[in-house]
Amino acid sequence: MTRFSLSLTRRAALLLAAGLVAFAGSSYAQSPNPLAKRGGTLTAIIQPEPVILTSAINTAAPTGTVSGNIFDGLVDYDSQLNPKPALAEKWDVSPDGLAITFHLRKGVKWHDGKPFTSADVKWTLENVWQKIHPRNQATFGRVKQVDTPDENTVILRLSEPSVAILSSVNSNGAQVLPKHLYEGTDVLNNPYNNKPVGTGAFVFKEWSKGNHIILERNADYWDKDKPYLDRIIFKVIPDAAARAAALEKGEVQYAVFSPVPLKDAERLGKLPNLKIETRGYEWLSPWLFFDLNVDNPYLKDVKVRRAIAHAIDTKAVANVVWYGFGKPAISPVPSTLPQFHDASVPQYAFDPKKAEALLDEAGYKRGKDGVRFALSHDFIPYGDDYKRTGEYLKQALKRVGIEVTIRTQDTAAFTKRVYGDRDFDISSAWFAAFSDPQVGVSRAYWSGWIAKNTPWTNGSGYRNAEIDKIISDVQSEPDPQKRIAAFKRFQQIVQSDVPSIPLIELKFFTVHASNLKDVVSTADQIYGSLKNAWFDTAPKTN
Amino acid sequence: MRKVVVVQTFGYWGRRAAHMALVVIGIATINFFLLQLAPGDAVTVLAGEAGAATPEYLAALRQQFGLDQALPVQFAKYIGNILTFDLGHSFRHGMSVWRLIADRIPATFLLMGVSIGFAALIGSAFGVIAARYAGRAADTAISTLALLFYATPVFWIGLMLVVVFSVWLDWLPVGGMMKIEAGYTGFDHVMDVARHLVLPAVTLGLFFLAIYTRLMRAAMLEVYGQDFVRTAVAKGVRPHRVVLRHVLRNALLPGITMLGMQIGSILGGAVLVETVFSWPGLGRLAFEALFQRDLNLLLGILLCSSVIVVIVNLAVDLLYAWLDPRIELG
């Protein structure tokens, strides 16, 4: 779901805390790979078809996958989530945290030949990130003024420190648009949204709706000798079995976001011409959970919620339902965020007897037919894996005397039901936690989101004044240690109240051809650039 | 005498045209209100895909899409657009509905034309043969085969054909409409599209083929039993001439009805095949528009579809009159 921005990295936090000076550019972004071979056309799958090709306006996953190749970020994030220079060669934050200066790379050109300057950054921040970008309005809300003393320097003046900014400036979190093509136009309807002009390693060539998107090598790219590929063709292949066949046959060499059913993944991974890759999703940190509607007469009782948690075997969910593409979750802040994750939260071991005891205690004895009460379950309509998870829930709860009816609907009906009408008992969803729980986790618990008909927010309807206060406090808290302590307290409370039950930390995967090398070079590779990828042997043609 | 015929004909065409226009407007009205019943709107779908949004962002999008207006206002605008032959704008795609449909129509016509043509010709031929040798081995073989094609789900046939001819034998491409990587032009391009067309057209055609076979066989057998056929045989007309001249022509009518119905459903009929073979046709566009609550686009496709249906119905009526002079227009 939330597949947008990167968030605070450990490095950025430290830099900020130290009242930091400058982060000098390393050689990472510039060094060509001596082994890499030039040439070749990469055929990739893009599914579903993007709505638009500009991430600054729409943060959906397929948009990000294509757009990351056409645009650069101010920074990149390496596999350890450290920021690396991209369009910004270095950056510094004033000791009071109220000014952030970006020193931009010189000589960078837009694909139409016009120079990239600080004016582009200023214009995009003021007109797109602060006004249109679905999430950045919050992140950049504290920027009260943008100064551009020269063409290569941008200074953001803040009203309060904002830790989230430095972690949101890659090409997906804060994409810079060309001012000369957007200024004075209706940004949402600008034709360049669908034929983007960026600074990135690949130039947009053609989009045939329902068919394919073609990108060509940017021969004038600032990162010398890159990219190695001549062309990338993203093909729209709507059927999962057809995607598996196209990959198996070698017609397609790259596909992200778990493009084939889990049961096919194992088989494809064993073929000599294909590889399954789970890196490149680190910054997403997705977790799957059940939301329990706390307005339901049964589920409003915390004993019932705890009983349901005890009735679910998260190991079985991970290993059986999800074929091992997941790891049992302990807390809504996934273990992939080690500095924030709290493993000491109240836990609900798989124990049907205890679940039954809790339900008895809550006053819901088994009836003559063995049923205590009935609930409905609406699973997130993103495919069979989520439906299977719902079927598991039905089985698990039947064992402790709760009858579950599974309901099916499409995404629009699902989000309206759960986040608008609140006409459900138990729903499932996955959120991306990102590298800072402020961005990805807090929205699931903040009471301000309840019934706002805004997808992927507080589904359970949980209201807790202390939680609301923690969430608002961490936003302007500049001390990383205090923020971490606050998030640990947050986890203790929500896991004691269990308005939602974390199930597993999901592992998405990429399928790619064995002869395609250096497929993953950043922690957000799926939304990044394939500028480092190269073919060892020419792709199979047919 | 001649004048009367002219007046009658003119009256017929006038009535017919008014009738067709009314049907189309009626369908458009029903579609409009029916689609309002679907929960959620295009804006929540976009926000859902984006992964995050603020209520302000949603409100801004609704205003841009015109979804904040009262339903009667939206409906009045929609009907006004239709009457001026404007199908509106798809905000999701950022394009006019006309252009989106025009982009997809060639692929759809190609796929449906080839598969229906293949099915109608081969299917009818099979039907004629089966009727000619009713109860014999050829009939049993053809009837069994037709039943098999008819009963097997289309998507399954499609996937099996892909597994056999693309993955195992490596003769034909898995999907898509052309090999973009190769950049073919001219004759090579035509051959390339033809190669990509084989599997989806056969998949779709096999299902239709079964229908034509069964329909034609039944109609032929019925006509065989009639007096004028016996008369023709008694007169000494040669057997294959009886089949072609006397029986086939009279047995064609049910097939023509079927053909008309299938051409009418041309726009939406191939969702499954288009999905399995990544064929960039209109069926998929309509299917996706439904899930994305892109109502302008969906209404546009449905409207075009209804226009095609009424035109094809007219064509079928004319064809009836030509094939069987006993049927009169009027």
Image (cartoon, coloured by chain):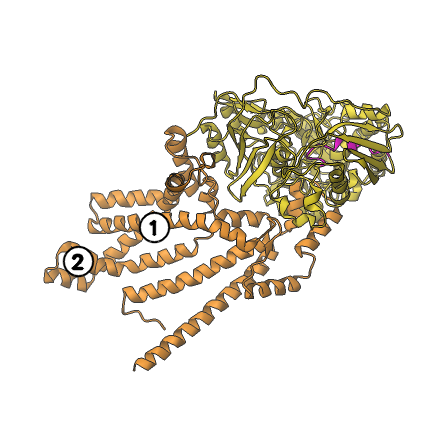
Q: Quadrant of residue B243?
A: bottom left
| Helix, strand or loop status at disc 2 | helix
- Residue A164 in the image, given as x and y percentages of width and height: 79, 33
**Residue A272 within the magenta-colored segment of the rendering:** no
Which chain comes out orange in the rendered image?
Answer: B
Identify which residue, A363 or B7, lies in the foreground: B7
Q: Name the side, left or right, on which B288 lies relative to B145.
A: right
Q: The numbered mark 2 sits on a residue in which chain?
A: B
Can you name the residue that lies furthest to the top here?
A34
Segment tinted magenta in the rendering: A161-174
Query: Is the residue under label 2 in contact with that under label 1 (CB below 8 Å)?
Result: no
Sequence-wise first label, 1 or 2: 1
Q: Nearer the viewer, residue A113 or A358?
A: A113
Residue B41 left/right relative to A252? right
Badges 1 and 2, same chain: yes
Quarter holding residue A65: top right
Residue corresponding to mark 1: B117
Q: Report the quarter where the C terminus of chain B lies.
A: bottom left
User: From the viewer's perspective, is residue B2 above or below residue A245?
Assistant: below
Q: Tag 1: residue type? A: Gly
Q: What residue is shown with label 2?
A: B242
Question: What amino acid type is highlighted by mark number 2?
Answer: Val
Chain appearing in yellow on the rendered image: A
